[in-house]
Each structure stands twice: as structure tokens, then as C-alpha cells.
Image (cartoon, grey):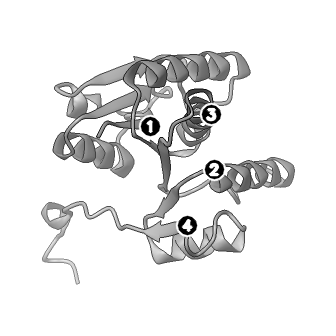
Amino acid sequence: MKIIRIITRMNVGGPSQNVSILNHYIPNSVLIYGSLSEGEGDMSYLVQDLKTYYISELQREINLIKDFKAFLKIYDIIKFERPDIIHTHLSKSGMLGRITGMLFRRSNSNDTRLYHTFHGNILTGYFGGLKSFIFILIERFLARHTTNIIAISESQKQELLKYKIGDDEKIKVIELGLDLEKFYDRNMQ
């Protein structure tokens, strides 16, 4: 079984650690990632010994020309790799990766499964009312075509359900399970 994971960028944070751990320990995994935003720390060293594809146009910021180029490149990689599973992380790569996955499934008459992990979201408080509403509509559409949605906490699942992004059956809670023991200060109470 071949798995392609797609993450917008390998910046400092839990999602980058999560995808690197998944790709290290699950055989036949491929990672697609994009470029950092200005001032972000780089964690791409975590995946330097893995099979990866770097797409410079895949970035956090909305840019229709770069987003379309990233979309085409992701589609070409998916067509070449022919994965059984496409697992996306973060908003931008979640959108582009699931749309390319849907097109790949349709054009190749196969049953590639699509999974998306929410590591937080941009549904409220990130953009203004109209943009937030548009993103909610997009996520609702994508959820209908996603095999399963992974929430990293029960509260996140409840938030997704509140916005009608998926249903109770489709959304699975899987906590990240990162070992934070080394960061725990035993002197703080």
C-alpha cells in the first residue's frame, strides 16, 4: 500500500513532527511539502532521509497563480506515484490535495482513499465573516468526498460538527501522541 501525505510546509510545530513520524514509521510513504512563510522556522531536516517532493508554489498564503501551479504539480505527483491513500494536513494542502485526489480517483476509476487531519482550523477568527463562510462551504464540500476526517481532539471534532463539516461517523478523533515528557518542568505546579 502506498501513502502520499501532503502538508503545506515543514515549519516549526506539531504538524511537521506528526507527518515526519508517520512517514518514518509507515512503509511506502511519500511526503509532498511546500515553502515556508517569511520568518518561519524550518523543520524539513526531519524528512531529509525520506522520499519527498518539494513544491515551492505550495505556500500558506493565498495566491491564485501559485496555488494553481501547486495544484498541477501535486496532480502530476499523484498520477506518477499512484497512491492507495492520500492523507492531507493543514488547510491549503488539505484543499489542494483532496481536490487533486478526487480528480485522480475519477480519471483513473480507482478507489484511492482520502484522509484529512485538522491541526486547528481557519473556520472562525482567522478571516472576516465572508471569507470564513466561504471556507466553511469549501470544507463541507471536501468533507463529502473525504473518506475520513481526523480531529486531534474531541473538542475539535465537536467544532467541526457544529459547522456541519462531516458527520459523527466520518470524523475520527486521533490525538497526535507526541512525547512531550522532555518539555515537562517538574518544578512547576
Q: CA distance from mark 3 to mark 1?
A: 23 Å
Which residue has dot 1 on it?
A: 7
Asked if the residues shown at circle 1 and circle 2 are in contact, with their CB atoms under 8 angstroms apart, the answer is no
Q: Which mark is residue 170?
A: 4
Q: Residue at x 51, y 45 (%)?
A: 90
Q: Position of residue 64 (x, y in %)?
A: 72, 22
Instruction: Please state if 123 lies on the left or on the right of 128 as rendered.
Output: left
Mark 2 is surrounded, within 10 Å at the Cα level, by few (under 14), some (14 to 19) or many (20 or more) other residues, namely: some
Q: CA distance from mark 1 to mark 2?
A: 19 Å
Q: Residue at x 29, y 29 (%)?
A: 44
Does residue 67 sit above or below 91 in this rendering? above
Instruction: Please state if 175 lies on the left or on the right of 130 as rendered.
Output: left
Label located before the other in sequence (3 or 1): 1
Label located before the other in sequence (4 or 1): 1
Q: Residue at x 17, y 70 (%)?
A: 185
Name the amino acid type tagged 2: His
Label located before the other in sequence (3 or 2): 3
Q: Which mark is residue 106?
A: 3
Does residue 44 sit above or below 68 in this rendering? below
Q: CA distance from mark 4 to mark 1?
A: 21 Å
Q: Position of residue 166 (x, y in %)?
A: 64, 64
Q: Which mark is residue 145?
A: 2
> Is label 1 or label 2 in front?
2
Mark 1 is surrounded, within 10 Å at the Cα level, by few (under 14), some (14 to 19) or many (20 or more) other residues, namely: many
Q: Position of residue 182 (x, y in %)?
A: 13, 61
Disc 3, SS: helix
Q: Position of residue 62 (x, y in %)?
A: 68, 30
Name the amino acid type tagged 3: Arg
Name the amino acid type tagged 1: Ile
Mark 3 is surrounded, within 10 Å at the Cα level, by few (under 14), some (14 to 19) or many (20 or more) other residues, namely: few
